[in-house]
Amino acid sequence: MLEYLGECAALVEREINRWIPKDIKPEILAKATRHLIEAGGKRLRPCLALTACEAVGGKREDAIETAAALELFHSFTLIHDDIMDHDEFRRNVKTVHVLWGEPIAIIAGDALFAKVFEAAAANASRLKMSSERMVELFNTLSRASFELCQGQVLDMLFEKRDDVTEEEYMQMISGKTGALTEAAAKAGALLGNADERQTQALASYGRLIGIAFQIQDDVLGVWGKQEKFGKPIGSDIREGKRTLMIVRALATASEKDREILLKAFGKSNATNVETREAIEVLKKVGAIDYVAERAHKLVAEAKLKLRVLPESKAKEALLGLADFVVEREF
Amino acid sequence: MLEYLGECAALVEREINRWIPKDIKPEILAKATRHLIEAGGKRLRPCLALTACEAVGGKREDAIETAAALELFHSFTLIHDDIMDHDEFRRNVKTVHVLWGEPIAIIAGDALFAKVFEAAAANASRLKMSSERMVELFNTLSRASFELCQGQVLDMLFEKRDDVTEEEYMQMISGKTGALTEAAAKAGALLGNADERQTQALASYGRLIGIAFQIQDDVLGVWGKQEKFGKPIGSDIREGKRTLMIVRALATASEKDREILLKAFGKSNATNVETREAIEVLKKVGAIDYVAERAHKLVAEAKLKLRVLPESKAKEALLGLADFVVEREF
């Protein structure tokens, strides 16, 4: 599966360079738009689109412009997120606003977003898509962006609240992460000329693994190895990010454990010892195991959705991708 | 002509409410996305699209979703611009980031941008546009957004430079303002099923009046009445905005006048007297007359482009709109 992912990533790399070439003017815009993309990333969303396209009987290449567009899209959201969260590092490099300032970072995100629709239009045009299907493709992308914004706002509102429920958290990450992975899989299906049933199945699959991905991301945010994951250990805790683990722990921990947790939670100046003790509480009250189980259930559900697809190497890859989402360490 | 503009604005108002309704969730996103739009604005870009559509033989209503999309688009750029420029007022109200903070303002802009493409897709779908024309419509919008980003970056880079030439300034505002007015007129033409020649003529017309509009905006930025224009007098000077007037004055003023100008230029703490003296220099060296003349020439050129259109009320409105751009006081 990782080999298959690697092939997809290689395919999409060239296409990304076509849409945000190094010679964009002014030069600073080229650098700022390309920075995070060049720094790495799993190319999960492009791979989802390419593989979904193949799984419904298309060729991977049929979805290549949109696959690149999805990575630009993702990168746009990361750049703007990093500004909002005041994050200084991502993918082991400094974030765009830290390197070039907030105004350039805002514009770089906007510029990437602009390219999303141009690339998708080029794809639709090359495939001589029917106008109905083209509208569906555009709606898929634009509705996902709007939902993403809604999820992002919820995330911010939750930071100020102590009583966020699990359901609210799930709704938030469904928008923040699930909307775009759904769009990726659905766009791939549309470009592969899938029928309605397959398109719906892939859309649901994409949404579910996106949610599972975010839960795992939150786990790695407190638990992952910095050199693999690219962010300082426990940074999510010090930033006061209301993750499913935190929601669960705050709801189930004893008064004393709660206190230990709150000593580091949302405290940017918490010591390493305080941060580590907070992480120990998450482990002790079973919050980490609990969310890992929820993520695995979502993945199982996602895999079931794929029953409507014929057996193929691409389908195998989608099944493997679902497992990867919760088993990854980066 | 103002009556015609008023009709267009009324038409588009309802449509805007369809795309960013008051019941968007979370509520803060509804408020932040709607704030500047509700505060007023001339609806110039929607009117351009509706009128262009009618001028090539379509009905105004044929372009209504895209007209609304253009106002969302414009509002998105204003919200992000205001963050970057640290502007606190626009249209006589506080800016979005001042009211709700930068993160919400960034997201509100992104959310408006997302809706642009959904509204345009709905328009194309309703008209049963051919897929080729649909691709052209999408390219028009997405390429304009990218060019706008490029213009915005140039604007920022220019703030740090003392040797910006008039040509560079014109290139910058062509991207920052001309790209979107071109897109508005061109989109209207495409939706009205214009032929290639008419589409090109309207695109050029839109670009030219956009550039003229920006030059006049810069004049009003130092010279306009606050109660009409909505921004404090001379704020552009204190902010160090490199406008055509400034470029011209710095290149032609005597050493002494230059000094007076630079006492207020880019000095956020310049006194009212210093600001007024700087404005007097702009007047004295003829910079204000000079740029007014350039704006009028651009408008004359824009009007010439319309020769390819048959006579109609809509064509009259476009001619009037071109004059309005440089004669307005708000």
Image (cartoon, coloured by chain):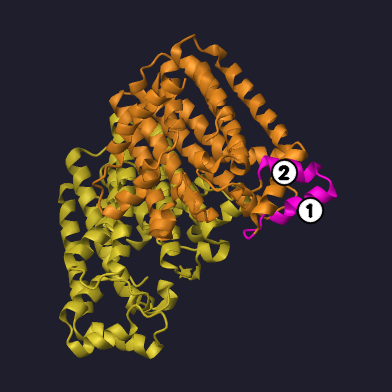
Chain colours: A orange, B yellow
Assess disc 1: are there few (<14), some (14-19) or many (≥20) residues with their C-alpha within 10 Å of its C-alpha.
some
Q: Nearer the viewer, residue B180 or A126?
A: A126
Indicate left or right for A258 with A293 as reference: right
- In the rendered view, tell whether residue B106 sits above or below residue B212: above
Q: Residue furthest right?
A: A255
Is residue A70 or residue B40 the one in the foreground?
A70
Q: What amino acid is found at the position of numbered circle 1 in the picture?
A: Glu
Instruction: Name the side, left or right, on which A148 lies relative to B227.
Output: right
Range of the magenta residues? A243-269
Residue under numbered circle 1: A259
Residue found 32% across the figure and 64% down from its top = B156
The percent coordinates of residue B59 (x first, y second) are 34, 42
Q: Residue furthest front?
A: A273
In the rendered view, tell whether residue B163 sits above or below residue B22: below
Q: What mark, if any, has residue B168 been given in the picture?
A: none
Q: Is residue B230 magenta?
A: no
* Residue A268, magenta (yes or no): yes
The image shows residue B306 at horizontal and vertical percentages of 19, 52
Can residue B130 be seen by looking at this rendering? Answer: no
Neighbour class for label 2 at 10 Å: few (<14), some, many (≥20)? some
- Quarter-wise, where is residue B154 in the image? bottom left
**Who's the residue at 35% across and 54% down the image?**
B45
Tell me the amino acid under the disc marked 2: Glu
What residue does disc 2 label? Answer: A280
Image quarter for residue A208?
top right
Of badges 1 and 2, the one in the foreground is 2
- Residue A5 versus residue B238: which sits nearer the camera? A5
